[in-house]
Amino acid sequence: MITDFAREPEGLEWYVVNDNVMGGRSSGGFELSDGKLLFSGSTNTRGGGFSSVRSRGPRMDLAEFAGIRLRVKGDGRRYSWQLRTNAMYRGRELGYWRDFETTAGQWLEIDLPFADFVPKFRGTQLDLGPPDPAQISGMGLMISDGNDGPFAIEVDSVQAYRDSEPSSQ
């Protein structure tokens, strides 16, 4: 278990990054309540079209695991999970992203294999390999599905899984 949001691991800090950092008009935020993270707001594709919540620290060595398993209840929109490692591109941290779909009002367990994460820098996919799971330094949740309007997703837990641990999907 990385987090179940009932009690944060020491050093895991969540913060918001919206497209207003580049002049966009989307809004979004999060709250931790009843052992869940609720990420909600509204996207506006005129000027960026994204909202995100991210964590920094602590560093995690997840090399013995196959990927990240999320338990989420979404709104039917597409979201992305982000991982950060010690990898750099043009002197800045590189993000690795994996999209996933939600079903409105339904709890889902979603497996995101490390091998399926793609490196991106400022929204542009790079021709590099997957993240090094031994060097995880942060993670996050983003919506940037090309649609305008409200969004809301609850995250009940984030855990690392092994190939031998089947999802309950």
Image (cartoon, rainbow, N blue to C red):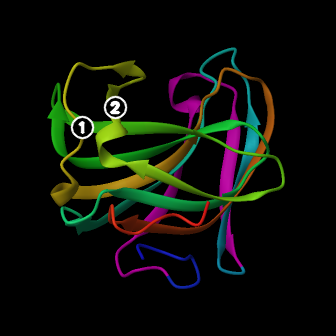
Quadrant of the image for the N terminus? bottom left
Residue 118, label in figure: 2
Residue in the foreground of this view, choosing between 89 and 129: 129
Q: Residue at x 62, y 23 (%)?
A: 24
The span from disc 1 to disc 2 (Cα, nearest Å) is 6 Å
Quadrant of the image for the C terminus? bottom right
Give the residue pinned by disc 1. Answer: 130
First in sequence: mark 1 or mark 2? 2
Is residue 4 found left or right of 150 in the rendered image?
left
Q: Residue at x 57, y 76 (%)?
A: 5
Q: Residue at x 79, y 45 (%)?
A: 75
Is residue 162 found left or right of 14 in the rendered image?
left
Q: Quadrant of residue 97?
A: top left
Residue type indicated by callout 2: Val
Which segment did they paint magenta?
Answer: 8-33
Numbered-mark total? 2
Relative to 146, is 117 above or below?
below
Q: Quadrant of residue 157?
A: bottom right
Q: Is residue 39 magenta?
A: no
Q: Residue at x 69, y 26 (%)?
A: 25
**Looking at the picture, how far across and down is residue 98, in whole percent?**
45, 38
Q: Residues within 10 Å of mark 2 (few under 14, many from 20)?
A: many
